[in-house]
Amino acid sequence: MIPSVLPTYNRAPLSFVKGEGAWLTEADGRRFLDLGAGIAVNALGHAHPALVNALTEQAHALWHVSNLYQIPQQQALADMLVEHTFADTVFFTNSGTEACELAVKMARKHFHDKGQPERVEIITFDGSFHGRSSAGIAAAGSEKMTKGFGPLLPGFVHVKFGDLDAVTTAITDRTAAILIEPVQGEGGIRPVPDADMKTLRRICDENGLLLILDEVQCGVGRTGRLFAHEWAGITPDIMMVAKGIGGGFPLGAVLATENAASGMTAGTHGSTYGGNPLGCAVGCAVMEQVATPAFLEGVSRKAGLLRQKLEGLVADHPEVFEEVRGMGLMLGLKCKATNTDVVGAGYDNLVITVPAADNVIRLLPPLTLTEDDIAEALIRLDKAATQVEKQLATA
Ligand SMILES: *Cc1c(COP(=O)(O)O)cnc(C)c1O
């Protein structure tokens, strides 16, 4: 009999009932160190006082009004994002994949309105992830996500990750844009080198294409910059944001330049809940914390410490791990053992990590992780690795 919850997830038998900072309490009272943060969502950890205040204050005042009216919280968050980024304008969504939908529509409408309606194709990369909507799965294109789901949204051209020659070859007079994650998340924490990001920007400029960045997972301070593309010293035309921006409240956004967004006039797009007062009040509180040099320096400092200790962990457990990869607090441990076994051993030792493709486990802790948390993380990860080693020895 089908479960009452549609069984599209393989869920661990863990029910968390309370969170504080980087810590989660299970229904049976056990306390887990959370290095997953809801897959890079709880950027400020669990129950951050500033977010709890923002949400409860707004909840007492007003939950929902339609986008038919002014929404001051939405205006404030858009102004903050415009102030701190390349963007001239912002549309709010409830999720990352809805941001993908608009990014695709915006790019096509841009060329349509510029008199090049044949430019509809978007070049994307293998191993990418852009969410589970029809545009999202067509953009990523993997068999795992698309098989059985009928005719896919046309207009995506897939090239090998890291193969910039293939990008150039794929460009035709039907190409509208290149869409890429600066650091692949689901794909196994694979950063795009700065030089490649610069080359992609140049390729877009030379061919009159739009550069769309998916910073749903790597954005909002995760890499130690407000957005990951800043490390390469380039800017996109369109950027998808979600996950961290809501700190746990469902919130996403598409950021764009005035030029890229020029086709999106009144009536061309909409959302019932996107940009609602609750989400935007929380989003403003997230931005107030994260978008400061001191906070971002703190992320880089803690990331350096965590990474150094993880290098030691890998060296101590060569049968379990191969290497550390990633940027900032978006780190991956490429496994020699089976990644899901390592995640499971983590559960046994009260530390939460997240599996990814390419046999990687992801560490995406709250950006507010403390040095004590990092020390505790290493103790628990070391125990988990030792447990996996024992399992391997008796297998
Ligand atoms: C999670 C994710 C998405 C999809 O976001 P949802 O909120 O789950 O729709 C899109 N792109 C990237 C890079 C992601 O990590």
Image: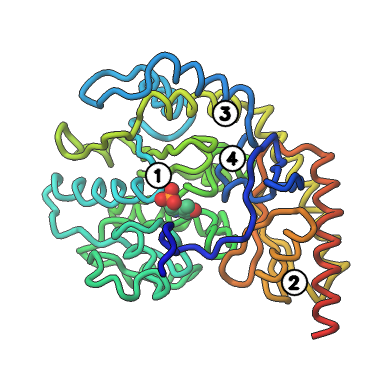
For marks 2 and 4 on the same chain, the one whose residue lies earlier in the sequence: 4
Q: For mark 3, what is the residue?
A: 291
Is 36 left or right of 262, judged from the image as shown?
right
Q: For mark 4, what is the residue?
A: 42
How far across and down, in percent of the image, does residue 173 sit? 20, 64
How far across and down, in percent of the image, does residue 235 sit? 44, 43
Q: In the image, what residue occupies the spot 75% across and 65% down?
A: 345
Distance of label 2 from label 1 (alpha carbons): 33 Å
Is the C terminus in the top left, top right, bottom left or bottom right quadrant? bottom right
For marks 2 and 3 on the same chain, the one whose residue lies earlier in the sequence: 3
User: What's the residue type where badge 2 is placed?
Assistant: Glu
Front label number (3 vs 1)? 1
User: What's the residue type where badge 3 is placed?
Assistant: Ala
User: What's the residue type where badge 4 is placed?
Assistant: Asn
Is 178 left or right of 8, judged from the image as shown?
left
Distance of label 2 from label 3 (alpha carbons): 34 Å
**Residue 322: mark in rendering:** 2
**Residue 308: mark in rendering:** none
Relative to the observer, which residue lies in front, 59 or 120? 59
